[in-house]
Every structure is written in C-alpha cells, then in structure tokens.
C-alpha cells in the first residue's frame, strides 16, 4: 500500500499527520503587501480521508477583488475549509476530486450572506490502495509529478485569455453578468498510476509564473533523502527561489514570456503569493 507522509510548514508551524506515508512539506512566500496585515490569498488544506486516500488542495484568491474592498483570501480560504470538512465527513469519492470541489462551491453559493470573491483551485488525491493519483485543476494553479528527474505528468493551465485564469466566483447580484465565473465541471481532470519515489509538487501560479520546469527540477535534485527536514528544506528553497525571481526586473520569467507571446512588451518576474506543496510517494510499513 502506498502512503503520503506529510510535514507541513505554514511557514514555520509543523503539523504531523498520523497514519500516512507520503512525505510532504509546504512552504509559503507572501507578496510584499502581506506585511501590512492583509491575509494571504493562497490557502491550502490537507486531511486524511481514512486509510484509503490522501487529498492535497491549493486555492488562489483572485487579487482584483481588493479594488472593491473584498479580501481575496476569504473566498479561497472558505472554499478550502469546506473541502476539508466534506472530506472529514466522508462526503468524498477519492476518484472524483471534481465532486468535492463542486459540492464545496455550491455550498458557498447557498450562503444567506454571499461570500464575494473568486478563486482558482487544484486538488490531487492519492488512492493508497490502487496507487493512482486523481486530479482536478481549475485555473492556473497546478501540479507536477516528477520521476527519475523528469516531469512525467503535468496539469494544463486553464486561461480564458492572457492573465485571466478559469475561476470559481461569487459576485454581488447587480454584477453577476459582469464577473467571470466558471463551473467546477470545467476543471481539467486526470487519473494515472504513481510509483514509489514519485515526487508530487502542487503549487499556485506564483511558482509557475516565475520558475520554468527546468529550474524546479534543478531544485528537486537537491533532495537527497526523504526525511522531513530534507523535504521541508527543498520546498522552502523552491518557494524562496521563485520569490527572488519574482522581483528581478531583468529576468525573462515564464509570465513575461507568455506576455510577449500575447503581444505585450513585458520583462521581469511576477510578484505574487507563492504556495508550494511537496510530496513523495513512499511505502507504508506498520
């Protein structure tokens, strides 16, 4: 049976989850504006669904809502908390991560007091018995599966047009037609086998906009063993490296390259919140 052993850093607290053996670590770098007390827009959730499945989720609140006095982290954070609760309650089918995302979103829609905002979301679920990874990705967060130093699976970024990712949204009634909103069913889904030693990286667009895959692979090569400290150090190194690149005005980032491909003269990184979840598939021994 395969498991995910988890260590989580947010960014300095460590939560040990029992009964898992996919080694896991998260690291978060916050955009500069968070220094003035604004909550981070990139929440994540992890919860063990019993002995059968290990979900990992990230969501990224759309920052444009700040212009209207709305805290973007509230929508994405509540979406992830709802996903976590549904998993705890057993209202969750490991092979259908879109299902838990859909139920969570429609619960938010039914709130008497609307929770305004928008968010992307990425959920990956390891079925420990079948050794399959089930994924659902809506927007420009995403995941990589690395085996033998190469990317063997990668999520597809979903964009309506440049810098406008697919997103779940709740708008005020008077603006419902003017706010972009996608259905959870629009999420890109996949399912595939994983192997012992596979590295699963899940992250928000703050990572992928600033670090191309080859740089991420270079950082992952520094992971010499699978103990908690090594995974933690590697995840933090990836997030911090991306954070530095985000503020380099001369760096041709993936975001800048994408902008140029769309006819815009852009150079430099893209300052943003960066959340990195790093997991390694390992075999559970009782």
Image (tube, rainbow, N blue to C red):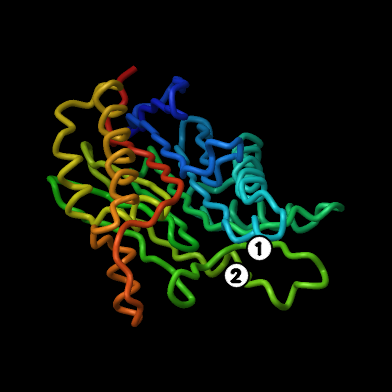
Vertical position of residue 113 compared to residue 24: above or below: below
Q: Gap between marks 2 and 1, in whole Å?
A: 7 Å
Eyeballing the image, is 282 above or below 219? above
Tell me the residue that label 1 is attached to: 169
Specify the quadrant of the image occupied by residue 38. top right
Q: Which residue is mark 2?
A: 182
| Other-residue count near label 2 (Cα within 10 Å), few / some / many at <14 / 14–19 / ≥20 | some
In the picture, the quarter occupied by the N terminus is top left
Q: Residue furthest right?
A: 112
Q: The C terminus is located in which quarter?
A: top left
Residue lying furthest front in this view? 249
Q: Which residue corresponds to the image point at 29% horizontal and 65% vertical from the top-left?
A: 267
Q: Secondary structure at mark 1?
A: strand
Residue at the extreme bottom: 263
Left of 52 or right of it: where is 224? left
* Quadrant hosting residue 110: bottom right
Tell me if residue 256 can be seen: yes
Total marks shown come to 2
Of 249 and 25, which appears nearest the observer?
Answer: 249
Callout 2–callout 1 Cβ contact below 8 Å = yes
* Mark in the foreground, 2 or 1: 1
Q: Nearer the viewer, residue 165 or 227?
A: 165
Residue for point 71% across, 60% down: 68
- The percent position of residue 104, horizontal first and vertical second, equals 66, 51
């Amino acid at each position: 049976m395969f498991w995910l052993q988890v260590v989580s850093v947010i960014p300095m607290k460590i939560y040990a989850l029992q009964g898992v053996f996919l080694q896991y670590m998260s690291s978060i770098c916050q955009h500069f504006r968070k220094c003035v007390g604004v909550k981070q827009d990139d929440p994540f959730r992890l919860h063990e669904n019993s002995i059968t499945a290990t979900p990992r989720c990230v969501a990224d609140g759309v920052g444009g809502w700040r212009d209207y006095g709305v805290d973007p982290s509230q929508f994405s954070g509540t979406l992830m908390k709802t996903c976590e609760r549904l998993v705890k309650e057993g209202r969750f089918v490991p092979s259908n991560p879109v299902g838990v995302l859909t139920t969570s979103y429609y619960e938010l829609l039914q709130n008497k007091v609307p929770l305004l905002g928008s968010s992307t979301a990425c959920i990956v679920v390891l079925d420990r018995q079948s050794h399959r990874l089930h994924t659902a990705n809506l927007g420009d967060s995403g995941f990589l599966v690395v085996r033998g130093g190469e990317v063997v699976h990668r999520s597809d970024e979903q964009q309506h047009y440049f810098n406008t990712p697919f997103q779940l949204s709740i708008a005020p009634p008077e603006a419902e037609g003017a706010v972009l909103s996608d259905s959870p069913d629009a999420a890109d889904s996949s399912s595939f086998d994983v192997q012992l030693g596979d590295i699963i990286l899940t992250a928000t667009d703050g990572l992928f906009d600033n670090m191309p895959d080859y740089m991420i692979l270079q950082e992952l090569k520094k992971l010499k063993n699978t103990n908690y400290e090594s995974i933690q150090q590697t995840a933090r190194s990836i997030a911090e490296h991306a954070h530095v690149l985000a503020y380099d005005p001369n760096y041709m980032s993936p975001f800048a390259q994408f902008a140029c491909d769309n006819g815009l003269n852009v150079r430099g990184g893209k300052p943003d919140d960066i959340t990195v979840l790093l997991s390694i598939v390992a075999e559970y021994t009782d």
